[in-house]
């Protein structure tokens, strides 16, 4: 859990190389405020991006976080890469997904 955001998983795995890939993680907004979630682009590799479906999670609403990995945009691909969420009022380490590249 990231504060009031509940996630089915905080880790994802993508294949190394190839073309753009996407995975979805089920999520739930347990707060009393709407959440607009996206990628913290200052802290995250350009190869990783996140968006939520729906774009705004209302209080008590379930949705999905759609994570995209585009190897063509990577400067460097490490075996494990952090993806930081924007839209949560938490320190970076408490709003980080772990992305494994196999």
Image: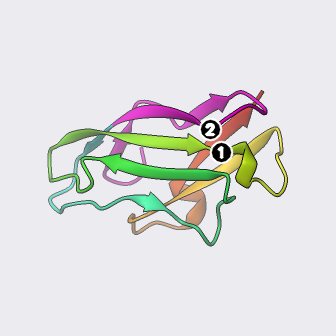
**What is the x, y in percent for residue 43?**
65, 67
Q: Earlier in the sequence, mark 1 or mark 2?
A: 2
User: In the rendered view, would you say 61 is above or below 83?
Assistant: above
In what quadrant of the picture does the N terminus appear?
Answer: top left
Element at badge 2?
Answer: loop
Which label is found at residue 70? 1
Left or right: residue 20 compared with residue 5: right
Which label is found at residue 17? none
In what quadrant of the picture does the C terminus appear?
Answer: top right
Q: Residue at x 76, y 41 (%)?
A: 80
**What is the x, y in percent for residue 66?**
43, 41
Q: CA distance from mark 1 to mark 2?
A: 4 Å
In this view, the residue in front, 53 or 79, is: 53
Image quarter of residue 55? bottom left
Left or right: residue 52 compared with residue 72: left
In the rendered image, residue 18 lying in the magenta stretch gets the answer yes
**What is the x, y in percent for residue 93?**
60, 59
User: In the rendered view, would you say 53 is above or below 21?
Assistant: below
Q: How many marks?
A: 2
How many neighbours does mark 2 have within 10 angstroms: few (below 14), some (14-19), or many (20 or more)? some
* Magenta residues, start to end: 1-26
How many neighbours does mark 1 have within 10 angstroms: few (below 14), some (14-19), or many (20 or more)? some
Element at badge 1?
Answer: loop
**Residue bearing mark 2:** 20
State if disc 2 and disc 1 touch (CB < 8 Å). Answer: yes
Q: Residue at x 38, y 65 (%)?
A: 87
Left or right: residue 52 compared with residue 74: left
In this view, the residue in front, 39 or 95, is: 39
Q: Residue at x 72, y 27 (%)?
A: 15
């Amino acid at each position: 859990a990231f504060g009031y955001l509940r996630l089915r998983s905080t880790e994802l795995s993508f294949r190394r190389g190839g073309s753009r890939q996407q995975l979805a993680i089920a999520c739930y907004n347990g707060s009393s405020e709407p959440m607009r979630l996206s990628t913290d682009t200052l802290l995250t590799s350009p190869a990783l991006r996140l968006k939520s479906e729906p774009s705004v999670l209302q209080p008590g609403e379930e949705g999905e976080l759609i994570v995209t990995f585009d190897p063509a945009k990577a400067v460097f691909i490490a075996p494990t890469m952090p993806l930081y969420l924007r839209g949560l009022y938490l320190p970076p380490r408490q709003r980080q997904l772990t992305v494994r590249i196999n």
